[in-house]
Amino acid sequence: MIVLGIETSCDETAAAVVNADRRILANEVFSQIDEHTPFGGVVPEVAARAHLDLIDGVIETTIEKAGITLDDLDAVAATGGPGLIGGVLVGTMTAKAIAAVKGCPFIAVNHLEGHALTARLTDDVTFPYLLLLVSGGHCQLLVVKGVGNYKRLGTTIDDALGEAFDKTAKMLGLGFPGGPAVERTATAGDGQRFSLPRPLMGRPGADFSFSGLKTKVRQTIEGLPPGDLQEQDVADLCASFQVAAGDVLADRVGNAMAIFQDLHPDTDQPVLVVAGGVAANQVLRHRLQSLSSEQGFHFIAPPPNLCTDNGAMIAWAGIERLRLGDTDSMNFRPRPRWPLDPDAPPALGGNGAAGAKA
């Protein structure tokens, strides 16, 4: 069984070929960083146009490197949402066209499920397991019960952690993308210099909040002596931000671990999987790995190149669904929002309104 996966939900144009033996035959990712850097962030219209320009070449290179032809494919999978709708449309329409011409099934993959199932590709994890999905657009804790079967334990009530990383980097003049820039700069910093808040830390439940942390970074910058930020100030703020973020994650994940064990007391070896772009941060990985050891959980995080957006995770999710006979018709409509747990109640912000990532 061989599946082509296409990922175009944000600012990476990606394609991969994966087989049912968990082998990645080819995995190509074309980053649009150069296109978006002048704007300090991802511009949806720019991203969609770049996907249109790049997608054919990326797929052609992927097929060539995999050593196959389109006739060898058993299915074509593409991110069907959630994401920037212009980019999602490019990927799904391309996948539908290939599937129609070659007469093979088309599979619309939930982008979040691609991240959620990556650990089954890399480490052959068995269900159920606890998942921390942390990226620029999402921050959730879920129980992964099976393909298409998720229970959300917690989510952000305002900003995703990846968004807070990006905004912090922008305020400090570190450029785009912000996450890697903050992590690099923090290596030269003192994480104890600045006192930053740990929103929701110590409270029951597994929800997250990062807007207050982001706001305090801005206020701290404004409170420094006038003039250009000193290099050490920037490094210390990055380090302090990263320590605070790690404290919040450890606290919230610790609560989720207890909930998971209450829900699945017969699990011999509980597993924590960390996925999404922020999971590539080595400091946060080590913090969560230590927490897992303390709580008796086995810790799994995919390689950094499979934490960020990629086609391999979409191809693998396609294989998981194809095994179940779960494919999509050509009438599938891309979805800008697509929760993994549609039965979960809306996340409530501080004013009682539904949070941005609900």
Image (cartoon, rainbow, N blue to C red):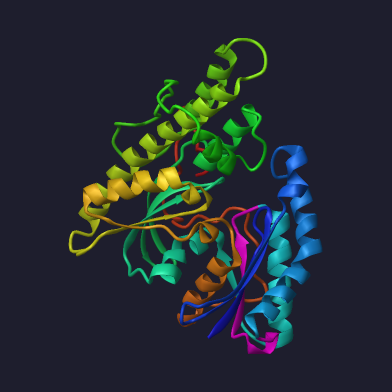
Where is residue 217? Give x, y as percent: 53, 24
Q: Is residue 153 above or below residue 89?
A: above
Where is residue 190? Give x, y as percent: 44, 27
Q: Residue at x 62, y 20 (%)?
A: 229
The answer to whether residue 150 is visible is yes
| Left or right side of 43 for 172 | left
Q: How many marks?
A: 0
| Left or right side of 139 for 35 | right
Residue that sits furthest to the top in the current view: 225
Q: Residue at x 80, y 56 (%)?
A: 49
The answer to whether residue 345 is visible is no
Q: Residue at x 42, y 20 (%)?
A: 195
Q: Is residue 48 above or below residue 184?
A: below
| Left or right side of 166 for 93 | right
Q: Does the magenta-highlighted stretch encompass residue 74?
A: yes
Q: Is residue 196 above or below residue 309?
A: above
Name the residue nearer the viewer: 358 or 114: 114
Q: Does the magenta-highlighted stretch encompass residue 20?
A: no
The part of the image, by quadrant, that contains residue 196 is top left
Where is residue 138? Give x, y as percent: 51, 47
Q: Which residues are magenta?
A: 68-83
Where is residue 297? Give x, y as percent: 26, 55
Name the residue nearer the viewer: 302 or 339: 302
Q: Is residue 209 above or below residue 99?
A: above
